[in-house]
Amino acid sequence: MSLMYKIEVKENVKICVDVHDEILHQIRLQQILSKEEMIDIFVEELEKKGFSSTDRTDIGNKKDVANKKDVANKKVANKKDISNKQSQNHEKVWIRHDEELDEIQIFDPQNMELIASINQSREEEKEITREGHGDLDFNTKTQIRKRALHLIEEDRHQLEQDLQEQVQQEITQKLQDNTEKRNADIQDVLQRTYGRALKERAKTIGQVVAQQESENDGIYELKITIEL
C-alpha cells in the first residue's frame, strides 16, 4: 500500500524592485543670436534654476543618474571659465534634482533635449505558504519538500512582477503629473533666454537708449529703443 506524504512549508521572502522611467522634452531655440550663443545663454538661465554642469562621463547612462543626487547637487561651474565655454559645452550636460517634483532633470546641449527621470526602489516582505505532496514509495521527503519550495519561488517571482508593474505605473503617472510644472519651468527659461538674446542683438544694431520689460498673465513683453 502506498504511503502518501504531505508537508507544509512557510517562507518569509523579500521582494525588491528597481524601476526607472523618463520623459523627454525637445528644446527648440529661435536663432536670435548664433546657435552657440543661444545655448550659452540658455544654460546660464538653467543654472539660475539650480542646474549645474558636469561631464558626460560623470553621469553614465540615464538610469544611473536617477540615483546620483550628489551629481545633481554639484557646485555650478565658475563663471570665470566663460571664455572656453562654447567648446566645453559640447562635453557637458546640465543636471539638477528637482526636490519639488522629486525627479532628476538633465539637459543635453548636443541633442537639445531635457530628460526628466525617476528611479524608485521598493522592498517588501511576504510570508508564503505552500504544500508538497508525494508518494513515499517513489519520492523522498526531501524531494517533496523541494516541490513545495519550488512553488514558493514561483509565487515570489509573481509577487515581484506584480510589484514591478505597480511601481512602474506609479512613477509613470508621477512623471505625467509633473509635466505641467516642468513645462512652465522650461518656458520661463526660454523666455529669459530670448529676452537676453534680444538685448544683445539690439546692441549690434545701434545704441540702446531705453528698454522696458513686463510680464502679465504669463505674457512677456520687451520694448527696446535704439538710436541708430
Image (spheres, helix red, strand yellow):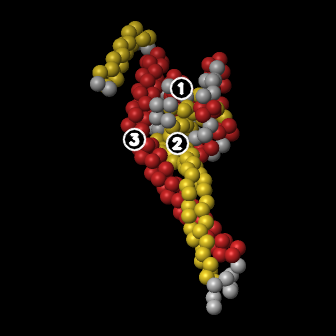
Q: What's the CA distance linking mark 2 and mark 1? A: 16 Å
Query: Which residue is rendered at x = 69% and y = 75% of the image?
Result: 141
Q: Earlier in the sequence, mark 2 or mark 3?
A: 2
Indicate left or right for 95 with 220 as reference: right
The residue tagged with tag 3: helix, strand or loop?
Answer: helix
| Left/right of residue 138 with respect to residue 108 in the rendered view | right
Label 2 CA crowd tier, 10 Å (few <14, some 14–19, many 20+): many
Q: Is mark 2 in CB contact (under 8 Å) with mark 1?
A: no
Q: Is residue 190 visible?
A: no
Dot 2 falls on a residue whose secondary structure is strand
Query: 194 or 69, which is in the foreground?
Result: 69
Choose between 201 and 94: the one closer to the eye: 94
Q: Which residue is mark 1?
A: 50
Q: Residue at x 51, y 54 (%)?
A: 163
Neighbourhood count class around disc 3 (C-alpha, 10 Å): few under 14, some 14–19, many 20 upward: few
Residue under circle 3? 177
| Residue 129 percent coordinates (x, y) | 56, 64
Amino acid on which disc 3 is placed: Asp
Quarter of the image that includes the N terminus: bottom right
Horizontal and vertical percent position of residue 148:
61, 70
Residue occupied by mark 2: 117
Q: From this viewpoint, is residue 144 visible?
A: yes
Task: Say which label, 3 or 1, has the lower sequence index.
Answer: 1
